[in-house]
Image: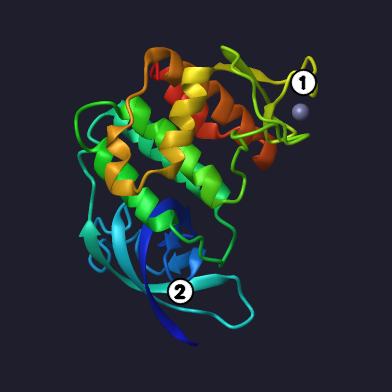
Amino acid sequence: MPPFVTESVILRVMDFQERDLLVTFYGDQKGKLTGIAKGAKASRRRFGANLDLMAHVRIHGFERPGSSLVRLEGADLLEHFESVRADLTGFARACYVAEWAEACAPEGEPVKGLLPLLLWTLRSLGKTGAREAVLRLFELRALDLAGYGLKLDACVSCGALLEQELSIRIGISQGGALCRNCQGAEGFSISRGTLRLLQEARSLPLERLHRVAFSSLALKESKGLLRAFFVYHAGRTLRSTEFLESMGK
Ligand SMILES: [Zn+2]
């Protein structure tokens, strides 16, 4: 059984049999994996709070020949992010980010940049301030990393430059902006300001991402657009979307 060590974020934890936990995590070395943590449910001695949702940990594990499930031997806590989950709304946000990341990451295949994005998102959600904007930035960048990035610089269908219109039509199935000649009745309209802001937000390095200032219109438009685009690619809505919406977010 080849051992491995990987810096990870915990994406999902479920009870498994009487004493064990089934843990899905995203790791920089191995991508998204699910593993059995033996005895972790019955006794918190070995893992403690290190397997909490969205904990940043260094996981020690073994691959199991012939099985897609790995075995977790230990988890060193790097950051716990308790302030993110301090209230129900914060917990709903954490569930939402975890579920979105889980859906974006293929099994056992690292996605370059996803771990730094998750950590940026969690650290930003732990601070007071524009948490709605943090979620929009996470959604946009996660879609880009997963290879589903919206094409916004020119018409996705014919390549024509977009005219200086106040409102831009985005085709969800086409994957980007549509010029006047190519657009039909379907799709999503966003303002030119929102389009510019999304373009800026996807090009900035993570350490400068907090500088992107969303207007309330840009927040509303990008939320509708990014979620519709995600649902199109994932083929389903996320369970946690409803939970988050019920918190009025
Ligand atoms: Zn066109």
Q: Are marks 1 and 2 in contact (CB under 8 Å)?
A: no
Q: Residue at x 54, y 80 (%)?
A: 64
**Residue situated furthest bottom in the rendering:** 1
Q: For residue 163, say whether it is visible.
A: yes
Residue pointed to by mark 2: 71
* Label 1 beta carbon less than 8 Å to ligand 1: yes
Q: For residue 99, say whether it is visible.
A: no
**Where residue 63 sits in the image (x, y, percent)?**
51, 79
Residue 249 vs residue 41, the one in the foreground: 249
Residue pointed to by mark 1: 183
The quarter of the picture where residue 108 lies is: bottom right
Q: What is the tally of numbered marks visible in this picture? A: 2
Q: Name the residue type under label 2.
A: Arg
Whether 132 is drawn above or below 77: the answer is above
Q: Residue at x 21, y 43 (%)?
A: 82
The quarter of the picture where residue 137 lies is: top left
**Where residue 28 sits in the image (x, y, percent)?**
42, 66
Q: Could you give the CA–CA distance between mark 1 and mark 2, rounded to whole angstroms?
A: 50 Å
Dot 1: few (<14), some (14–19), or many (≥20) neighbours within 10 Å? some
**Which quadrant of the figure shows ligand 1?**
top right
Dot 2: few (<14), some (14–19), or many (≥20) neighbours within 10 Å? many
Q: Name the residue type under label 1.
A: Gln
Quarter in which the C terminus is drawn: top left
Secondary structure category for the residue under label 2: strand
